Image (tube, coloured by chain):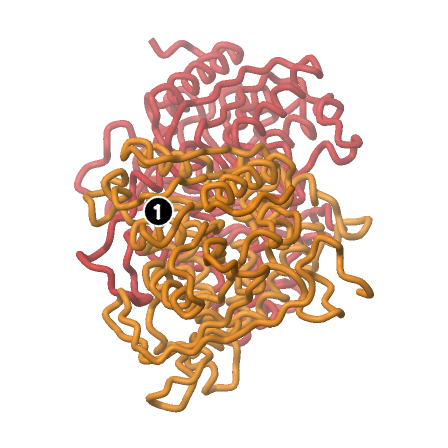
Chain colours: A red, B orange
Amino acid sequence: MTEMPRESVGLVTPRTAHFDDPLELACGKTLPAYDLVYETYGTLNAERSNAVLICHALSGHHHAAGFHSPEDRKPGWWDAHIGPGKSIDTERFFVVSLNNLGGCHGSTGPTSLNPETGEPWGPDFPMMTVLDWVHSQARLADRLGIQRFAAIIGGSLGGMQVLQWALSYPDRIAHAGVIAATPKLSAQNIAFNEVARQAIRSDPDFFDGRYADHGTLPRRGLKLARMVGHITYLSEDAMGSKFGRDLRSADLNFGYDVEFQVESYLRHQGDTFSSSFDAHTYLLMTKALDYFDPAADHDGDLSAAVAPATCPFLVVSFSSDWRFPPSRSRELVNALIRAGKSVSYANIDSPHGHDAFLLPEPRYQAIFTAFMERVAHDQGLEDRS
Amino acid sequence: MTEMPRESVGLVTPRTAHFDDPLELACGKTLPAYDLVYETYGTLNAERSNAVLICHALSGHHHAAGFHSPEDRKPGWWDAHIGPGKSIDTERFFVVSLNNLGGCHGSTGPTSLNPETGEPWGPDFPMMTVLDWVHSQARLADRLGIQRFAAIIGGSLGGMQVLQWALSYPDRIAHAGVIAATPKLSAQNIAFNEVARQAIRSDPDFFDGRYADHGTLPRRGLKLARMVGHITYLSEDAMGSKFGRDLRSADLNFGYDVEFQVESYLRHQGDTFSSSFDAHTYLLMTKALDYFDPAADHDGDLSAAVAPATCPFLVVSFSSDWRFPPSRSRELVNALIRAGKSVSYANIDSPHGHDAFLLPEPRYQAIFTAFMERVAHDQGLEDRS
């Protein structure tokens, strides 16, 4: 790449915040100290009223926008929506994006050293929950001098963190953007996660989680987990129009080499992922998804669970998302309405399944932009024009 | 079990038919000789006009009805629909049910001895297609003295065999019952099959298919394959109402032991299957599914592909089947109508997903029974009453 795209935040450099005060976790354990790696885009204003926190999904990380080097072929994972003139306009907002605890992109996680042993945490890394992440994100906000976020926004598992913020820290979130998420997983969602976990944990190279000690990586399991995941991220129609039943070569080979394009795609996705992502992180992230259920402490009454929230919500779903379908978003919307909260809801017509939340789509962008205009207005930010 | 249920065909004994005339296969290879194991229920009439062939699905076999011993806790896989007074009334019809070639329940398959080597075929067993099965089934019919079946009926992959019969042997099938099937797999269907195959083939105990030589079984892979399969057999709602997010014990354990009931169910299904089913057979069956596409030789024009069919069709789908949804059955129905064929179609409202085709459901039973009444009438069979 010789020149940055005009609407890019350009070159960005991750930073690391170290925390020495122990973090008590939902599982009952305590993380004595930890690092959070994060990026920021834009400038925090003098009133500190323009900060937007981005929460990432299962395989996401802090690198949400821009490029790490001029040689980067791909920008951050949400570059379609973060940058100058984009939905989350970095000329107006100060955007914070971090890698969650338990991750494998720089924040303290299973590949980090356990201070008690001097060895990588591996399987001893404590189980994380959405609530734990939100607490750690609040500490990062303290560190950055942000008392209250103008908005907290996330898709999928990221959307769950946004909802948790609204319940746990209602005074610190002015607007909530919950995109392609669900107030809790269905049995089928848990089932897919369980297949992924079994694939990883039954890989002989997993060694009960001690793969680092054995100099191995459970690549086969992680590959399978990612393949299953990818099926659920794409709609049946998107997969059909992308690959159909197209053959890779002209004839059937009547063997187990790749015959159909969709096989080639899945194997490639699985292979790439399995050499770049940590298996323990994948396990942790799927469990955090399974555990998320804010209504559980309220006899399953979600409208009672959302009572503490004070901020207005934007809830977005995508018509062809079968992982967290529109009906799941409407559960949240209805609970918010029953609880008397302010909520806007949009179901975006898109053929791209769950992945649609990552993509630019005109109506999605328009709604997202309008929401951020409202955020700017509510926060008294200077008009762009 | 001390007494057979009244509506059961009772104790049944599988028989084996040996064939010495080579079978040319779609893959270009030839099976020099083979066995087909089968069961029959009811009595072939003097006119040989009351024979019904049952075609099985991916993990099915010849044991469709009745019991193998008084100690059997479960009857055959389609006992809900085959027996005295049931939809396929064995007081009226002579029912033939076989294990397909490539199977692992007695018919020649990967676990059989390769006559050329005296060793099990294993990975050298030739790839099977729906067309190959239909040819072998026609030979079994010859052996049993059945020139023309009153009806051929099957669900899922079994339904594909029925359709192939109507195209390849129109003179030998008087009525076709295609249940919960599709005229070809979607990219998503192929993707799920590919995950299952990769799970089996990447299991280190698979040894490039030579697991028998190594005294191993790719149980981990087969378990994962079955777990993925089970998710697609049940509807999201069925899984939800069966398991919900119920915990196995009172509390979260924040670990990777079973926490949710659905995890327990899937692991159990996977474990049971992985100790009773052959991995090569599973691989073969998924490929046969992927390959099936009768319209492929007609530039994708299914109505041109079905031109040879002469029999009336019953096509049945189930509202919550997301593996082969009603829209896929309607593709077939529409093609048959465009081709001027006789077809009845019913979409049964059922919460049970793809598995619904195996279950008794009043409206399904009523439609199935009415269809078989028509078969009996068309065949000039004596009225039951």
Q: Quadrant of residue A148?
A: top right
Q: Residue at x 54, y 45 (%)?
A: B354
In the image: residue A111, left or right of residue B237: left
- Kindly state the secondary structure of the residue where label 1 is placed: loop
| Disc 1 residue crowd, few under 14, some 14–19, many 20+, Cα 10 Å | many
From the viewer's side, name the closer residue of A177 and B378.
B378
Q: Quadrant of residue A149?
A: top right
Q: Which quadrant of the figure contains the C terminus of chain A?
A: top left
| Residue assigned mark 1 | B184
**Residue B248 horizontal/vertical position (percent):** 76, 52
**Residue B336 horizontal/vertical position (percent):** 33, 36
In the image: residue A240, left or right of residue B383: left
Q: Residue at x 45, y 87 (%)?
A: B213
Q: Amino acid at mark 1?
A: Lys
Q: Which chain letter matches label 1? A: B
**Residue A111 horizontal/vertical position (percent):** 53, 61
